[in-house]
């Protein structure tokens, strides 16, 4: 066997097991070696049967003194109970396959069992433990790895596969330079792999884990820094005179908040310097990021430059287009739109005007990064809701100008720890104050039993002329998941509010249907909009005063906060109802945090603690690959260390072409996949 062999060469891996492994990204024996345990079971010590062990996974030894069937023993899945006794007490062992287990465990014979001890009606119990004869105790004693679950494959099978490929560990060469290994006191590769899969003592497991945490974070940081090399941070860039911006600022019907003034001052210094601006502006929903972007665009126009604004969805792009066109019309600034659903003739006309300079500002989706999009004099690139774009997409748009200034805006509050990793090449500004007059949204937690009264109260809001969002995590009914679907809610609410227009918005609708529904909702023709999370970003309807989030336990905190931000945009008091279908401890914690806090950054920090970065900042959409063993929050010290080392490596070998860095390059390409383009 060789490392690059298909997993089907292993004994016990037939077509079904191969498919199960492939579903988890395991195709070769090398992939399987890097499928690390998530935890370990310590089975080294045989414990005496005792109530003190309730809730613990332990190894016990004893004699089978009796057995009892709970039904017909010849039928499948009939429970069988064995009473096990040692010199300290007794415990009931339960299996759900009496026909097989009746012959496996003999009366008056000694066995060893490993499993979790529970208490049932005052008696100790173990359900489906691992078992073997006492004279074969070495088969179950030791430190056993527990791997992340793969549907259709047991832990014993996974351990068996690892044993089969164990000899291949000798084929794996050390790829980290000796200098890095010594300076950072990390284990060598062979030692680490052996001890992560076949540990003999806990100290060696810790050493092995540290090696792979360090390794994974080094690969991550090298990939991120490599992609960021393409951004012209520090280069001489387009210099923009911001003195003309005050013509636009003075025309506004409101004053900048203190937070906006602080951010605009930082941007002004960037634009008037000789260096390219690369700045991330974070601001909670409704904090006034768009007007900051408009001020930047206006300054670029006054200085003779074009601007481009890229949005993640067509709905949001069209909303920005409409807003910019309305705000800039009186200044003679021409705004264009480029979106996937436009007719070919319309696209050609826009592209021609953009190239000739007739269009001053172009708003679009990822269509803006297509090769046929050309500018006459691009000076500013703005990406809205940046977390939906990878670094490469932003780089492609920036590359359409001579080192244009880059402004990144996000309403998704990102804890600073993560922001520094995701946007390490950007200066970070935060709009930390809200515009005057915005009332706090009243957030109310409800149970399934309170649904009826919630919708009765909503009826009063509709009668008073206001509009309502009702959000659900699903589009169609599913027998597998008990959740309110948009389809079901739509029918229910249409019947409940017969005299008002109720519509449904979800991701499967065509562009024209979505736009038509959103236009009618914005005009106030639609009173209740039942939707999936497609309304999470960008939509601004000031008359909407109620947000209902059904099955709120299925949403993350940050996501719920984003949804809540769709209401409370006018001067009326607004409400957010969080309807819990399953009252788990974590769900109750999340709901409590939502009811107590309206600060997006505090909520994001709490979300990070509860769910971890991988689940919140879905890997691909943020340009952040999935971590298998490292945790960018818990292992922050290693993250910082690996960043310095990655920077040193790239400083001396920018394309990772040297013999010494070839394996690092291969691993970076494997980790980032399509998100990275290592230019040879």
Image (cartoon, rainbow, N blue to C red):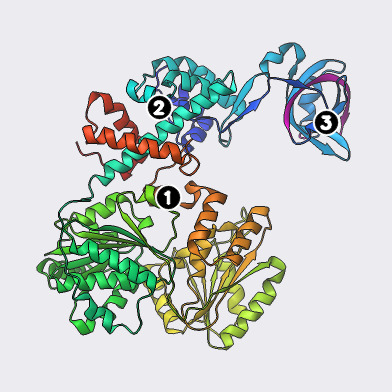
Label 2, on which residue? Answer: 184
**Residue at the spot 79% in from the left edge and 35% down from the top edge:** 54
Position above or below: 620 against 134: below
Any magenta on residue 66?
yes
Return the residue nearer the eye: 211 or 536. Answer: 211
Percent x, y of residue 360 = 17, 72
Whether tag 2 and tag 1 are in contact, CB under 8 A, the answer is: no
Q: Is residue 359 visible?
A: no
Position above or below: 101 against 634: above
**Which numbered tag is attached to residue 456?**
none
Q: On the rendered image, what quadrant is the C terminus found in?
A: top left
Q: Residues within 10 Å of mark 1 (few under 14, many from 20)?
A: some
**Residue at the spot 58% in from the left edge and 64% down from the top edge:** 594
Is residue 588 toward the left or the right of residue 226 in the image? Answer: right
Return the residue nearer the eye: 664 or 75. Answer: 664
Return the residue nearer the eye: 174 or 164. Answer: 174
Is residue 111 toward the left or the right of residue 610 in the image? Answer: right
Is residue 483 toward the left or the right of residue 30 in the image? Answer: right
Identify the mark nearer the N-term, 3 or 2.
Answer: 3
**Which numbered tag is attached to residue 418?**
1
Identify the mark nearer the N-term, 3 or 1.
Answer: 3
**Residue at the spot 83% in from the left edge and 31% down from the top edge:** 80
Label 3, on which residue? Answer: 80
Gap in angstroms between the C-alphas marked 3 and 1: 52 Å
Percent x, y of residue 273 = 18, 60
Within the image, what quadrant is residue 379 found in?
A: bottom left
Whether tag 3 and tag 2 are in contact, CB under 8 A, the answer is: no
């Amino acid at each position: 066997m060789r490392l690059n062999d298909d997993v089907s060469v292993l004994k016990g891996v037939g077509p079904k097991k191969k498919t199960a492994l492939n579903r988890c990204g395991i195709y070769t024996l090398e992939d399987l070696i890097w499928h690390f345990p998530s935890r370990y079971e310590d089975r080294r010590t045989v414990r005496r049967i005792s109530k003190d062990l309730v809730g613990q996974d332990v190894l016990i030894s004893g004699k089978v003194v009796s057995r009892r069937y709970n039904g017909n023993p010849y039928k499948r899945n009939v429970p069988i109970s064995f009473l096990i006794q040692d010199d300290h007490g007794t415990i009931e062992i339960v299996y759900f396959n009496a026909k097989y287990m009746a012959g496996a465990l003999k009366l008056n014979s000694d066995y060893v069992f490993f499993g979790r001890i529970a208490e049932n009606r005052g008696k100790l119990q173990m359900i489906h433990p691992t078992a073997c004869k006492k004279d074969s105790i070495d088969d179950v004693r030791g430190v056993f790895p527990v791997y992340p679950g793969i549907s259709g494959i047991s832990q014993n099978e996974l351990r068996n596969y690892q044993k089969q490929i164990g000899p291949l560990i000798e084929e794996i060469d050390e790829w980290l330079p000796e200098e890095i290994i010594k300076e950072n006191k990390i284990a060598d590769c062979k030692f680490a792999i052996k001890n992560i899969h076949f540990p003999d003592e806990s100290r060696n497991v810790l050493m092995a884990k540290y090696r792979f945490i360090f390794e994974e974070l080094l690969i991550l940081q090298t990939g991120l820094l490599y992609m960021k090399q393409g951004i012209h941070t520090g280069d001489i860039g387009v210099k923009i005179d911001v003195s003309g911006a005050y013509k636009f600022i003075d025309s506004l019907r409101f004053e900048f908040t203190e937070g906006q003034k602080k951010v605009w001052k930082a941007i002004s210094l960037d634009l008037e310097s000789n260096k390219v601006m690369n700045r991330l502006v974070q601001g909670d929903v409704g904090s006034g990021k768009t007007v900051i972007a408009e001020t930047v665009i206006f300054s670029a126009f006054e200085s003779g430059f074009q601007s481009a604004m890229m949005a993640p969805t067509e709905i949001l792009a069209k909303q920005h287009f409409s807003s910019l066109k309305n705000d800039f019309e009186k200044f003679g600034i021409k705004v264009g739109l480029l979106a996937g659903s436009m007719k070919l003739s319309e696209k050609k006309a826009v592209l021609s005007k953009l190239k000739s300079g007739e269009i001053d500002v172009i708003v679009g989706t990822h269509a803006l990064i297509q090769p046929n999009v050309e500018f006459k004099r691009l000076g500013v690139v703005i990406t809205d809701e940046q977390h939906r774009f990878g670094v490469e997409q932003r780089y492609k748009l920036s590359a359409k100008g001579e080192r244009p200034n880059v402004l990144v805006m996000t309403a998704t509050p990102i804890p600073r720890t993560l922001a520094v990793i995701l946007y390490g090449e950007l200066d970070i500004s935060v709009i930390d104050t809200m515009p005057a007059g915005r009332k706090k949204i009243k957030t109310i937690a409800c149970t399934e039993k309170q649904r009826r009264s919630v919708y009765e109260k909503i009826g009063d809001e509709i009668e008073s002329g206001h509009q309502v969002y009702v959000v659900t995590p699903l589009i169609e009914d599913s027998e597998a998941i008990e959740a309110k679907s948009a389809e079901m809610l739509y029918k229910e609410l249409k019947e409940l509010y017969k005299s008002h227009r109720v519509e449904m918005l979800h991701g499967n609708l065509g562009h024209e249907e979505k736009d038509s529904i959103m236009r009618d909702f914005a005009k106030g023709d639609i009173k209740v909009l039942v939707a999936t999370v497609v309304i999470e970003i960008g939509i601004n309807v000031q008359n909407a005063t109620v947000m209902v989030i059904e099955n709120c336990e299925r949403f993350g905190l940050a996501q719920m906060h984003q949804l809540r931000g769709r209401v409370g945009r006018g001067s009326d008091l607004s409400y957010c109802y969080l309807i819990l279908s399953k009252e788990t401890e974590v769900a109750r914690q999340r709901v409590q945090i939502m009811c107590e806090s309206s600060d997006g950054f505090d909520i994001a920090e709490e979300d990070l603690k509860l769910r971890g970065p991988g689940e919140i900042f879905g890997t691909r959409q943020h340009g952040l690959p999935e971590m298998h063993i490292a945790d960018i929050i818990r292992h922050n010290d290693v993250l910082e260390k690996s960043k310095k080392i990655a920077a040193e490596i790239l400083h001396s070998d920018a394309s990772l072409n040297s013999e010494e860095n070839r394996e690092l390059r291969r691993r970076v390409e494997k980790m980032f996949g399509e998100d990275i383009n290592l230019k040879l």
